[in-house]
Image (cartoon, helix red, strand yellow):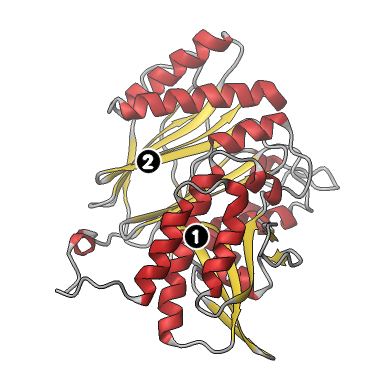
Amino acid sequence: MDRSEGFGERLLGRLLDRAHEMPPQLIAPLIADEVARVGGREVSILLQDYARELLVPLPGRGLRVCNPQDIGGSPAGRAFLTASCVEVERTGGVRMYLPLLDGSDEVGVMALTLDTVDDDDRRLLRRVAALVADMLITKHAYTDQFFQARRREEMSVAAEMQWSLLPPLTMSVPQVAVGGAVEPAYDIAGDSFDYALNDDILHAAVIDAMGHGLDAATMATVAIGAYRHARRAGISLAEKYAFLDQAIAEQFGPDHFVTAQMMHLDTTRGLFTWVNAGHPTPLLIREQQVIQRLEGPTTLPVGLGGERPSISEIQLKPGDRVLCYTDGVIEERDSGGESFGEQRLIDCVNRFGRVKSGMRASALQLSHILKQQRGGRTSDDATLFLIEWRGSSTSHLALQPG
């Protein structure tokens, strides 16, 4: 067995070894230095802003600080939305845009210029980008620099709380994918969602705490914390409802409540079960069109002492998506005072579905389209959460490549 260190291993190993104890402010020059070893220049690290409209440059010694790039209309944005490398021929070389993937969630894009590009360059730089993404996620946890780079306007305290509470906005594995979007990004308060893939069961919840500002954000924080505690205890959907109900009632009293949608998806069979606690009815999307409202028994919002809820269920087909949303999506009023309404939401989903896109892009683009259709207004929190059952197996991923 040849155990000698090749060029690619040396490059990745050096990057990993040097990053181990590297303070956050030196990550930028470290990345630029290592990329230069493969002939890369004009290196930029582009992070998605909180509104998820732009990719904004991370400043740092050795990095090229360019103008923010439009997620919906630039090569960098295309790499971000498709999670694939985009190459642009230009005078003096090839500009490469590589998605920075943390698992299946996206951190941003790494851009660099090479004189020429071959398959060896693509393979090595794809791996470098994956390592850079992991480094950024790790260092992100103990510095404010990356938060500050992503901000395009002032953020409310309530929004600070909510963003720190949210899980990764997308997850994609062979059996299932999820994607979420929240508006207004810099002033979100009472809306939130959470999920976890535990063995073959996807656990998910979407919540909407009554009120606005810090009061709503505080209630949402308690609700999500209680949900995670209940989920990790391995209890049923009905028991999760009872646990959240008790937590909100004890903490905030009888005049406060949180609407909630709590769900399980068996990722091997496609059986989808849910409890609706005063929340808007989810929509079932098949072949990019809404085919059904997932109606069923509802119970009182958590905090109001509802009875043990009934469990609804439906058998999904591979490729089916379930869209959950909060009432701010459909209750926004236009300039004439008319409510946006569920039917206009369905119409937007159906029109949007004509262009099939992956989960990474779907929740983001649908949120932006709906905001445009509402005249750019989001006077109340408006959250979308998509679940897609793919029905594929993951057993091959555990096998060692030959």
- Residue where numbered disc 1 is placed: 132
- Callout 1 amino acid: Val
Q: Is residue 161 above or below residue 29?
A: above
Question: In the image, what residue occupies the spot 46% across and 88% down?
Answer: 118
Indicate left or right for 387 with 239 as reference: right
Front-lying residue, 278 or 91: 91
Question: Residue placed farthest to the front in the image?
Answer: 4
- Callout 2 amino acid: Ala
Question: Residue placed farthest to the left in the image?
Answer: 1
- Closer to the chain start, of discs 1 and 2, is 1
**Residue 92 image point, x, y percent:** 67, 90
Question: In the image, what residue occupies the spot 51% across and 75% down?
Answer: 37
- Residue where numbered disc 2 is placed: 196
Q: Is residue 374 above or below residue 201?
A: below
Question: In the image, what residue occupies the spot 64% across and 24% down?
Answer: 216
**Residue 237 image point, x, y percent:** 34, 29
Crowd class of label 2 (few under 14; some 14 to 19; many from 20; radius 10 Å) = some
